[in-house]
Image (tube, rainbow, N blue to C red):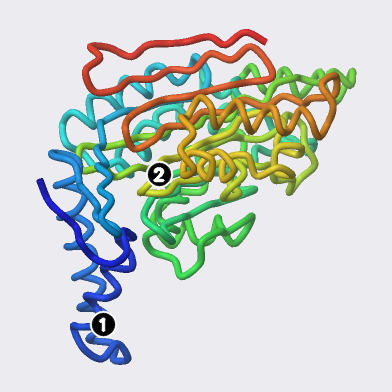
Amino acid sequence: MFLLTYKSCNLCDLINHILELAGDRNTANDNNKKVQIRWVIFDAFTVYSAVGGVRCSQFGHHKEIKSEMAAVGTWAFSQSAVERMQCMILAGQNSTDVIESAIGEVENDVDTGRNIVGRGGFPNSMGIVECDAAIMEGVPGRFGAVAALRGVGQPCQVARRIMDKSPHSFLVGEGAAAFAQEQGFTIEPNDRMLSDHTVAAYQEFTEKGIHVSGHDTIGLIALDLRGNITVGVSTSGAPFKSPGRVGDTPIPGCGLYADHMIGAAAASGDGDKIMCYCPSFHIVELMRQGFSPKEACCSVLADIRRKVGEDNCFEISLIALNMKGEVGATSSVEFPYTFWKQGMDSVEMHVLPC
């Protein structure tokens, strides 16, 4: 068992202290070397913690942290994605690659578009599909997002490239599309983003004013063998929304949040309301205080209900996963979610009643 006896149990503080000892931080070459050193340390720490756990010593008190592989997704249509995540995690793949691959499979499936995700999703009031997506690693500062992105069937892949390649964290509209093209993505014509179902629904909207209900953002969280945790979210947004409208989905702390020492959370529902309460950040902070994922989700929803009134609560569904592989969820509407954790033979679905 590895014993960490640094004066603070914060891994980032320890790494920064090591880097200070490595020499002057002000030169570009040294900074590049230190980035490499930082990732070697993180890799060594996460591999060891995933296999045997890490014991921290602070003022004589010991606390063991042990991670277990796990995956969770929002709504019933996430089952195939979580099954894919299970296979990839067991094969030793990184949580971020797992999220990008699994969420991309859903985004690019025209049949799941009716769930308000990616290709085949519902267009805005001008008949154009605009997608929002984001990905966030538990490692501090690792986040990428797009909003109002047109012509890309797998927007979370673009969000990943922003996280990895861009000096920015969040790109929208034409800027997001231009970046996607620079990264080799093809910007497809709008008719390739629609499905027969969404074209018919849009026609009913324009001719008869008939709206479509539903806010089924897909949210996925993966905890891998090395103790890395990543959360990804994607949506084509509220059907027939105003052009340029962005909901909670790609906003850190609202639609998603992750901390590599605590866990991660994601939200789905009425994004115009959800973004006002930062529920994903709130859930992770409660888990930091010792709440289980289920307790944290329920506490956040209860707090929102108190603020808006029990009879006025909007549609909101929440999932969370901590570093122990424990899963929690709650919702103001009937909410199926899927999950798998180390030791389970297959992915399970739970349905929460209203």
* Relative height, residue 163 to residue 337 (above, below): below
Task: Name the amino acid, label 2.
Answer: Ile
For the C terminus, the image quarter is top right
Residue 31 position in % (x across, y down): 27, 82
Judging by the rendered image, the residue that carries numbered circle 2 is 262
Q: Secondary structure at mark 1?
A: helix
Mark 1 belongs to which amino acid?
A: Glu
Residue 166 falls in which quadrant of the image? bottom left
Q: Which is more toward the observer, 165 or 54?
A: 54
Q: Residues within 10 Å of mark 2 (few under 14, many from 20)?
A: many
Element under disc 2 = loop
Residue 117 seen from this side: no
139, above or below 247, in the image: below
Residue 348: image x %, image y %?
A: 37, 11
- Position of 214 with respect to 54 (left or right) is right
The image quadrant of residue 163 is bottom left
Residue placed furthest toward the front: 60
Badge 1 crowding class, 10 Å Cα cut-off, few under 14, some 14 to 19, many 20 or more, is few
- Identify which residue is drawn at 55% across, 38% down: 283
Q: Nearer the viewer, residue 130 or 189?
A: 130
Where is residue 101 shown, x and y percent of the image? 34, 36
Mark sitting earlier along the chain (2/1): 1
Q: Point out residue 70 in the picture as x, y percentages from the top left corner.
A: 31, 28
Q: How many marks?
A: 2
90 vs 348: above or below:
below
Whether residue 244 sits left or right of residue 154 in the image: it is right
Residue drawn at 13 percent across, 39 percent down: 52
Query: How much space separates mark 2 and mark 1, taking CA atoms?
Result: 26 Å
Vertical arrangement, residue 210 with respect to residue 11, above or below: above
- Residue 72, labelled with which disc? none
Residue under circle 1? 20
Q: Nearer the viewer, residue 192 or 57?
A: 57
